Structure formats: C-alpha cells, structure tokens
Image: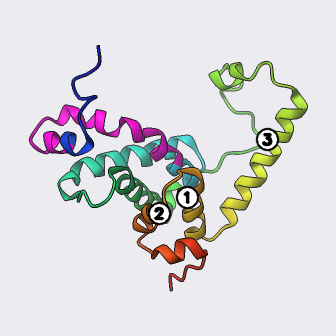
Amino acid sequence: MGSPTTNCSEAEMIAAILAGDTQQYHELIRPHERSVYMMALSYMKNEADAEDVAQEAFVKAFRSLSTFRSEAKFSTWLISITLNETRNRLRRPSVVRIESLDEPSDDEDTASPALLRDWREIPSEAVERHEVRKLLQQTVEALPDIYREVFLLRDVEELEINETAQTLKISVSDVRSGYIDRA
C-alpha cells in the first residue's frame, strides 16, 4: 500500500505544503535527492561538504517554496538553488579541507559497501576505469564554471536545453552554441 502522496502531482504537493502539510515536503524532494547531491559533489569534491550543501539547498528550497513559480520545473528550481549554494560555499575560505596523502586515514580497516560491491571486479579493469574517471573529472574540473555547469546539467543531469538555460539564466542559443560570455 503506497503513501497517499504518491499520486499527487508536484503542484498539488506544493499547494498542500504551503497550506501547512509540511510532512509532504520529503515526498516532494525525494525524487531529486540524488541529483542535488551529485551536483553538489561535482563542485565540493568531498562527500561531507556535498551533503552539507545538499541539505542546505533543501532547507532553502523549503523556506522559499512560496516563491516557486510553476513556470519552471521544480527540479530545475531546486538545481538552481543547489548551484547557488555551492558557489556561496566555494567563496568561503573555511570550506577548503586538506587531507594528507602521506598519513594513513583512520578508516582503512573498516569495510564499506562500495568495497564489498566490487569484490569480483577484474583488477586491470578497475585500474583502467579509475584512470578514465580521474581523467574525466580533471578535465571537467578544468573547464570554466559556466561550461562545467552546462555540461553537468545537459550531459549528467540530462536537462533539456530550455531547462539548462533557465537554470543558469543564460540564453538557449548560448547553451546550444557553447559560447557563453558572462562578462
């Protein structure tokens, strides 16, 4: 038996939340949790900071829900809030965390689900995949912010061109052409 909110549209859930049924907010954001987290992680570079950014984005979205205009998709609006929060965090010097590569980490002896999941993996394939992933990550990180944002929204989050333009507040032709002048 499903929850009574599963058949509600986003607009109906938002109306109910604004009318005082704040319990529905979790149902509203649940489909977007991974996207928000992945967007934050692509900028913050560590899971703890990405979780903080995602949490703050959800809190800000809740507090600003009354300003949401249904002209855009809720997911587009939520990603915009996430991008703004990541930019704000990156401007703060306190976000920079340095971890020594020379000192062993405290959690080396603990098993994680990720390690257990890959136990049958062929070592050479794992190394190759890791190298490709690292190269891709470095390449994406080297892009200017606006190009990285367009790439992540279009190719990772699979947003439409119009949604990407609306999220980044740029023209559709700029998203299409790849030429973006933020001066």
Q: Which mark is residue 146?
A: none
Residue receiving disc 2 = 164
Q: Earlier in the sequence, mark 2 or mark 1?
A: 1
- CA gap, disc 1 to disc 3? 23 Å
Which x, y percent locates residue 71? 27, 61
Q: Is residue 127 left or right of residue 148?
A: right
In the rendered image, the vertical position of residue 21 relative to residue 131, given as above or below: above
Q: In this orientation, which residue lies closer to the viewer: 89 or 5?
A: 5
Residue 96 shows in this picture: no
Q: In this orientation, which residue lies closer to the viewer: 48 or 68?
A: 68
Quadrant that contains the N terminus: top left
Q: Are marks 2 and 1 in contact (CB under 8 Å)?
A: yes
Going 21% across and 24% down the picture, which residue do you hit? 4
Category of crowding for the residue at label 3, using alpha-carbon neighbours closer than 10 angstroms: few (below 14), some (14–19), many (at least 20): few
Region of the chain picked out in magenta, as a range: 14-38
Three-letter amino acid code of the residue under disc 2 = Thr
Residue receiving disc 1 = 154
